[in-house]
Image (cartoon, helix red, strand yellow):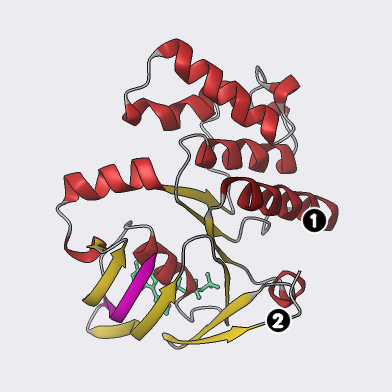
């Protein structure tokens, strides 16, 4: 469970200070699905970075299961990220010289898994996103939607507690967008993940059971009882 209290984040640009987050309080339960939307520059990506322990707030606390990521020493933070948090980005971020299988295996290296275990787990993860037959392909030999499936397999192969996605369909056309949303929803259901996604896409936001809107660093959460 996430518990955020009074989270602020200021960036300095020259002599200006930008309040990217201006006091965010937020609770996200285990297994929740939360969509974050809002105008450009509102603070969505900044919040996701705090949740993922990719950056630290200027003030406030970001507790994940009672551990404050804001104050965790860097080595322990790296361990939490490697074990408990999967990331999916708009730009896929695959390593172009590695095959789909090898890209997925990279997520298991920090966990200390042996070669054969890594290979088996990565192959299973690729099969679960429908890419079992494409394991030996390089990213450039795959479509955008397929590359994003590889990135999803890489994020989930370590069996994280939390999946964070920043505009995961932002680089995809409409049919691939629906396909990726289905893959993500299926993985969320199957693994009981806490799934937090930033999107600009209002049709995705409309279907969200819980919607956080961030404007000028301030958050408002609404529940949608009619969500899928
Ligand atoms: N590293 C940084 N240095 C300086 N300012 C930053 C940095 N990162 C973000 N900002 C500023 O903080 C504010 C919030 O940015 P953020 O990227 O979180 O917004 P966003 O809602 O994700 O926007 P978008 O929809 O355009 O991705 C913006 O004013 C942005 O310019």
Determine whether the beta carbon of the residue marked 1 sits less than 8 angstroms from the nearest atom of ligand 1.
no
Label ID, residue 225: 2
Q: Residue at x 34, y 47 (%)?
A: 81
Q: Nearer the viewer, mark 1 or mark 2?
A: 2
Q: Is residue 117 above or below residue 197?
A: above
On the image, the x and y values in percent for residue 141 come to 71, 26
- Residue at the outermost right position: 175
On the image, the x and y values in percent for residue 46 come to 40, 70
Q: Which residues are magenta?
A: 1-13
Report if residue 72 is visible in the image.
yes
Q: Residues within 10 Å of mark 1 (few under 14, many from 20)?
A: some
- Residue at the outermost top position: 116
Whether the magenta-drawn stretch holds residue 10 is answered as yes
On the image, the x and y values in percent for residue 169 come to 68, 56
Q: Is residue 41 above or below residue 167?
A: below
Compute the Cα span from label 1 to label 2: 22 Å
Q: Residue at x 55, y 29 (%)?
A: 96
| Dominant SS type (magenta) | strand
Task: Name which quarter of the figure residue 37 lies in.
Answer: bottom right
The C terminus, quarter of image:
bottom right
Whether the magenta-drawn stretch holds residue 182 is answered as no
Q: Is residue 165 above or below residue 146?
A: below
Task: Name which quarter of the figure residue 109 lies in.
Answer: top left
Image side of residue 138 versus residue 212, left or right? right
SS class of the residue under badge 2?
Answer: loop
SS class of the residue under badge 1?
Answer: helix
Q: Nearer the viewer, residue 199 or 84?
A: 84
Image side of residue 228 versus residue 114, left or right? right
Q: Nearer the viewer, residue 211 or 172?
A: 211
Residue assigned mark 1: 178
């Amino acid at each position: 469970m996430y518990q955020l209290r009074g989270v602020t984040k200021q960036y300095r640009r020259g002599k200006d200070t930008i309040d990217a987050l201006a006091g965010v309080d937020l609770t996200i339960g285990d297994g929740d699905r939360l969509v974050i939307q809002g105008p450009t520059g509102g603070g969505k990506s900044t919040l996701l970075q705090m949740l993922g322990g990719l950056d630290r707030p200027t003030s406030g606390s970001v507790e994940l299961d009672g551990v404050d990521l804001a104050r965790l020493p860097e080595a322990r933070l790296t361990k939490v990220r490697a074990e408990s948090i999967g990331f999916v980005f708009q730009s896929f971020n695959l390593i172009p010289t590695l095959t789909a299988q090898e890209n997925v295996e990279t997520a298991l290296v920090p966990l200390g898994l042996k070669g054969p275990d890594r290979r088996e787990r990565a192959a299973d993860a690729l099969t679960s996103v429908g890419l079992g037959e494409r394991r030996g392909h390089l990213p450039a030999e795959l479509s955008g939607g397929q590359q994003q499936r590889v990135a999803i397999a890489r994020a989930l192969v370590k069996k994280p507690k939390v999946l964070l996605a920043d505009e995961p369909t932002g680089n995809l056309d409409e049919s691939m967008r629906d396909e990726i949303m289905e893959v993500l929803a299926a993985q969320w259901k199957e693994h009981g993940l806490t799934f937090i996604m930033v999107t600009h896409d209002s049709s995705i936001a409309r279907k969200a059971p819980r919607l956080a809107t961030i404007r000028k660093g301030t958050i408002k959460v609404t529940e949608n009882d009619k969500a899928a």
